[in-house]
Amino acid sequence: MDDHSEFLTISGLAFGPKGHRRWPDALKARIVAETLEDGAKVQDVAERYGLRPNHLSAWRRLARDGKLVLPAPAVEADPVFTPMLVDPIAKPEDRCLPTAAIEIVHLNVVLRLGANTPAQRIAEIARALAT
């Protein structure tokens, strides 16, 4: 058995009576996640697993529609920081949302977040803006 088939068998891939492969959802999700990495091409990932690119694209549609749950993305080891401007002169009545406590400006977009926005969510937004 070649390395490719051995990996797939170890990963839980099942072969049906007519030689059809049955891909577990967890394995599908890992393969789809590989296509979402920077610089990855569906064609290359499909070839690596012996799939047709259109089959892999169908799995990507399932993930986009929420029918296939992808693994959580790897957390970056180092924090990513984005510049922040604090305006101590702004008055609460000048704001569009009186309950907004945090305002993030990126290019020509202004995000206003409520005072109860969790720090984790603010970090996710800052990380997304930095990429």
Image: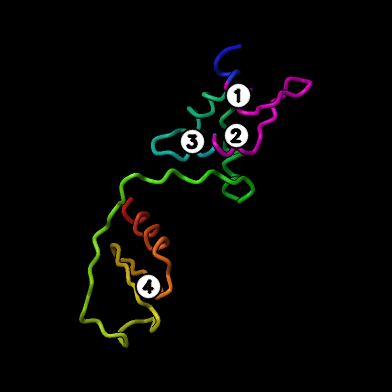
Say which label, 3 or 1, has the lower sequence index.
Answer: 1
Name the residue that disc number 3 marks: 34
Q: Is residue 41 magenta?
A: no
Residue 56 at what x, y percent from top left?
58, 34
Rate crowding at label 1 as few (under 14), some (14 to 19) or many (20 or more) other CA atoms within 10 Å. Answer: some
Say which label, 2 or 1, has the lower sequence index.
Answer: 1
Say which label, 3 or 2, has the lower sequence index.
Answer: 2
Q: Residue at x 50, y 29 (%)?
A: 45
Identify residue type, mark 1: Leu
Name the residue that disc number 1 marks: 8
As helix, strand or loop, the secondary structure at mark 4 comes to: strand
Mark toward the viewer: 1 or 4? 1
User: What is the CA distance from the residue labelled 2 to the residue labelled 4?
Assistant: 39 Å
Q: Which label sits on residue 112? A: 4
State yes or no: discs 2 and 1 in contact (Cβ < 8 Å). yes
Report whether 70 appears left or right of 111: right
Name the residue that disc number 2 marks: 27
Residue 121 at what x, y percent from top left?
42, 62
Vertical order, 47 against 57 (above or below) = above
